[in-house]
Image (spheres, grey):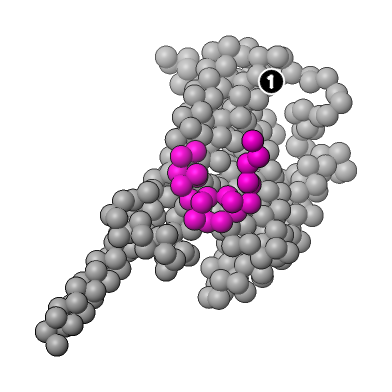
Amino acid sequence: MADLINMNGYGFYIWGSYLVTGVLMVLEVILVRRRRAKVWRRLDRIGRMQAHEDETRVEDEIET
Amino acid sequence: MAINWFKYSSPASFYPLAGRLIPWFGILAAILIVIGLYLGFVVAPTDYKQGEAYRIMFIHVPAAWMSMFIYVVMAIYASLALVLKTRLSTMMATAMAPTGAMFTFVALWTGAFWGKPMWGAWWVWDARLTSELILLFLYIGYMSLYAAIDDPRRAARASGLLALVGVVNVPVIYFSVKWWNTLHQGASISFGEAPTMAATMLAAMGVMALGFWMYTIAIVLMRVRCEILERERHSDWVQEMVGRGTHG
């Protein structure tokens, strides 16, 4: 295990490369998933607003 | 049976198709990267010249390949958008840019972490390194230009043109080690030449490259779906999805 971390003295360079690559790739997935959630939140809000508008319009029509 | 490929150039039919493909490419990417890491760290022998440090190659070379490959594909989509004015082409190009920039950064970062123990310097203004840095600026320039223009059609045209002009840089990166006297070593694999490295090293690098490729397809499809939803939010098919309450 110690050998794997040390890598004959190159551990810092090897793990410094792999760690940053891994973190960036995982981070990219998280960011895109968050963007997707944000887009859907916005679409749902607009959808609810429209549904509400439709409802009030129907109610108005019934009243008149 | 004839498949109507043009059908999938419309965002409405591409959106669900992309959604079905993402898990497959994602799983494939994970499997290939795990196999690649196993081959790279367990199976591949220690290099007689560079010792263990050469193992950085298994991410450095695939990342550098992806950085160039993504740029070329992005420029193709951008030119399709310029010529055919297809909406999906622009969305694909803009969805690819961040991943391309990420891999360019990874190639530069891992290059620095490989250069330091081998050359004694994190960075040198060598033709290969400099042209790869220009590639990073091109990606950033493309994204900034697209974001800076409000009108989507004008944004697509301006950034598309930049992407297209910037493609000149890709052969410069690729052949830089031949054209100039560089500190950077020559190509790891050349067409028409027998590879100079051990078969297991080559296999590890190839599998990692395939893994990165599958990752790229998965993440670009994820991002293009966001892009489609944002741009087509007023269209009937998106409204219908919202109405049904399904997050397809």
At horizontal 73% and vertical 64% (from top left) the residue drawn is B83
Percent coordinates x, y for residue B36 in the rendering = 56, 22
Observer-nearest of B28 and B56: B28
Residue B3 position (above or below residue B152)? above
Write down the region rendered in magenta.
B1-21
Give the prevailing secondary structure in the magenta stretch: helix
In the image, B1 versus B123, the foreground residue is: B1
- Does the magenta portion include B10? yes
The image quadrant that residue B40 belongs to is top right
Note whether A63 is above or below B7 in the view shown. below
Q: Does residue B114 appear left or right of residue B20 in this picture?
A: right
Instruction: Decide which of B111, B33 is in the foreground and name it.
Output: B33
Q: Which kind of residue does numbered mark 1 sit on? A: Leu
Q: Can residue B205 be seen in this view?
A: yes
**Which of the chains bears the disc numbered 1?**
B
- The residue beneath circle 1 is B202
Q: x and y percent of residue B228 in the render?
A: 48, 58
Expressed as whole percent of the image width and height from the top left, the position of residue B61 reads 66, 33
Callout 1: SS? helix
- Is the residue marked by circle 1 packed among few (<14), some (14-19), or many (20+) residues within 10 Å? some
Q: Residue B56 appears at what percent x and percent y?
A: 60, 29
Above or below, B71 relative to B83? above
